[in-house]
Structures are given as structure tokens and as C-alpha cells.
Image (cartoon, rainbow, N blue to C red):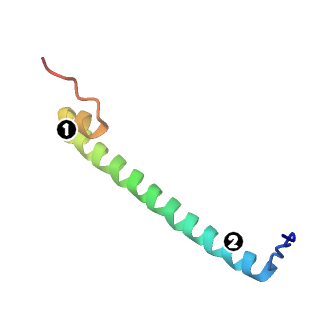
Amino acid sequence: MGQEQTTLNPSVLKSALRQAKARIGIRRGQKINTIAKKKKELKDHLESGNEGMALIHVGLEQHRP
């Protein structure tokens, strides 16, 4: 059983890193858009005086016995 050395191909690693960075950027953008959408919905509920719905969206609705 001889020891095999694995050589890393720099061009393959560079392209994999570039692709990973792109996927991370896409996911970050999706999260930012989701947060912005939820903030807008919350603002709309509060502006319309519908605090109950705003609390439900935030997840702070008090449990009724």
C-alpha cells in the first residue's frame, strides 16, 4: 500500500470557488428580498391599524386560554 499524493488543480479550484461565491451571492440576495418583503407587509399592517395581523406576521400573537 503506497501512499498516493493528490495534486490539486488550481484552475479547477478557482472555478469551483467562483461558482460557490455566485451561489452564496444568489442565496444572500434571496434572503434580503424575503426580509424586505416581510418588513413591507408588517409596515402595511401597522399603517392600516391592523396590529393583530402585524403580531401574527411577527409571530408574537399571544396565546389565548
Residue on which disc 2 sits:
17
For this view, does 32 lie left or right of residue 48? right
Quadrant of the image containing the C terminus: top left
Instruction: Tell me, for residue 36, which label it has, or none.
Output: none
Q: Give the Cα separation between the discs numbered 2 and 1.
A: 43 Å
Residue at x 87%, y 71% (from the top left corner): 2
Residue on which disc 1 sits:
53
Residue at x 57%, y 64% (from the top left corner): 24
When the figure is inspected, residue 50 is found, relative to residue 7, above or below; the finding is above
Q: Residues within 10 Å of mark 1 (few under 14, many from 20)?
A: some
Asked if the residue under mark 1 is in contact with the one under mark 2, i.e. CB atoms within 8 Å, the reply is: no
Instruction: Give the image quarter of residue 25.
Output: bottom right
For numbered disc 1, what is the local secondary structure? helix
Q: Nearer the viewer, residue 18 or 37?
A: 18
Q: Amino acid at mark 1?
A: Met
Q: Is residue 21 visible from the viewing direction of this image?
A: yes
Q: Is residue 49 visible from the viewing direction of this image?
A: no
Q: Position of residue 42 (x, y in %)?
A: 29, 43
Q: Residue furthest top?
A: 65
Decide which of tag 2 and tag 1 comes sooner along the chain.
2
For numbered disc 2, what is the local secondary structure? helix
Residue at x 86%, y 72% (from the top left corner): 5
Residue at x 69%, y 71% (from the top left corner): 17
Q: Amino acid at mark 2?
A: Leu
Q: Residue furthest left?
A: 65
Q: Position of residue 30 (x, y in %)?
A: 44, 62
When the figure is inspected, residue 61 is found, relative to residue 11, above or below; the finding is above
